[in-house]
């Protein structure tokens, strides 16, 4: 009864009731130029659950913009299964603003492995359209790659790996994602599934991992 009640709340009230959690992250390795950096992390929108009504996410967009973030990172599962679930929300999520930029990765649902497709080409076209939608929303989609983020003369690495999960899809290539970042003083990894941290990320020297999925 308890799990059922939680799910019922989630699909009725919880899906449009957004909260802001402010979490300070401290590290002696972080360059002084990045002290006070404000990152907004959002995850698991599953836009197919909103019935195509952009008004349901408008409050969340306004809350994020009110935080005046330097970076916005989205850690996967933009849709439930199909790219067209995100089409009605492109303009609304395109309103998200960040001083430095907006970055994203894919989650396990974004690969559309769960529904049955008529052929591999249709599935591939769906994923390609989803990647295009990330760009149309203003997000730089990181696919086993990294960006060097610069601020006030300092640099850190923002890394994005494709989905890798224990008992879930394992598309991500962490070695490729890390390549070329070794000299950066501080590295933030976006990885959708938090089980990735224990099974592969731990011990690599990554300073902060941001995940969704749960």
Image (cartoon, helix red, strand yellow):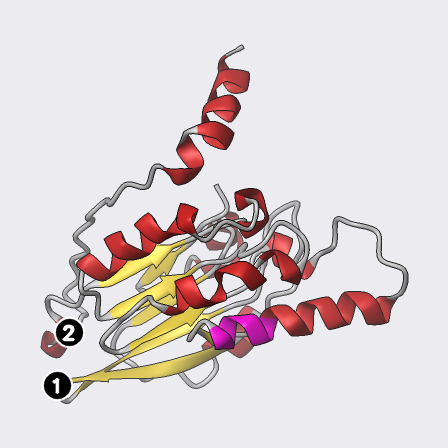
Q: Residue reaching furthest right? A: 118
Foreground: 131 or 173? 131
Seen at 42% across and 46% down, the residue is: 56
Q: Earlier in the sequence, mark 2 or mark 1?
A: 2
Indicate left or right for 92 with 97 as reference. right
**Residue 26 position by quadrant:** bottom left
In x, y percent, where is residue 189?
Answer: 40, 66
Q: Is residue 151 magenta?
A: no
**Residue 107 position by quadrant:** bottom right
Foreground: 53 or 94? 53
Q: Do the residues labelled 2 and 1 touch (CB within 8 Å)?
A: yes
Image quarter (top left, top right, bottom left or bottom right) of the N terminus: top right
Seen at 19% across and 48% down, the residue is: 22
Give the magenta-colored segment's residue range: 131-136
Q: Is residue 66 above or below residue 90?
A: above
- Residue tagged by mark 1? 152
In x, y percent, where is residue 165?
Answer: 59, 51
Indicate left or right for 105 with 33 as reference. right
Mark 2: secondary structure: helix
For label 2, count other residues whose C-alpha is less than 10 Å away and answer few (under 14), some (14-19) or many (20+). some
- Residue tagged by mark 2? 34
Seen at 51% across and 68% down, the residue is: 161
**Residue 111 position by quadrant:** bottom right
Using the rendered image of the protein, determine whether residue 72 is visible from the camera's viewpoint: yes
């Amino acid at each position: 009864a308890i799990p059922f009640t939680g799910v019922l709340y989630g699909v009725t009230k919880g899906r449009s009731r957004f909260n802001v959690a402010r979490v300070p992250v401290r590290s002696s390795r972080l360059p002084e130029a990045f002290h006070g950096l404000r990152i907004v992390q959002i995850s698991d929108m599953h836009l197919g659950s909103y019935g195509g009504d952009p008004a349901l996410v408008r409050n969340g967009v306004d809350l994020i913009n009110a935080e005046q973030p330097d970076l916005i990172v989205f850690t996967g599962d933009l849709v439930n299964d199909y790219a067209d679930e995100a089409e009605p929300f492109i303009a609304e999520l395109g309103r998200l603003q960040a001083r430095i930029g907006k970055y994203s990765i894919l989650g396990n649902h974004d690969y559309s492995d769960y529904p049955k497709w008529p052929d591999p080409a249709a599935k591939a076209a769906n994923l390609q359209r989803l990647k295009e939608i990330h760009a149309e929303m203003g997000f730089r989609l990181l696919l086993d790659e990294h960006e060097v983020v610069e601020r006030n003369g300092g640099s850190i690495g923002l890394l994005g790996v494709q989905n890798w999960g224990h008992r879930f899809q394992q598309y991500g290539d962490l070695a490729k994602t890390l390549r070329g970042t070794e000299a950066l003083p501080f590295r933030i990894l976006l990885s959708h599934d938090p089980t990735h941290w224990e099974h592969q990320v731990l011990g690599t020297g990554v300073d902060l991992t941001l995940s969704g999925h749960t």
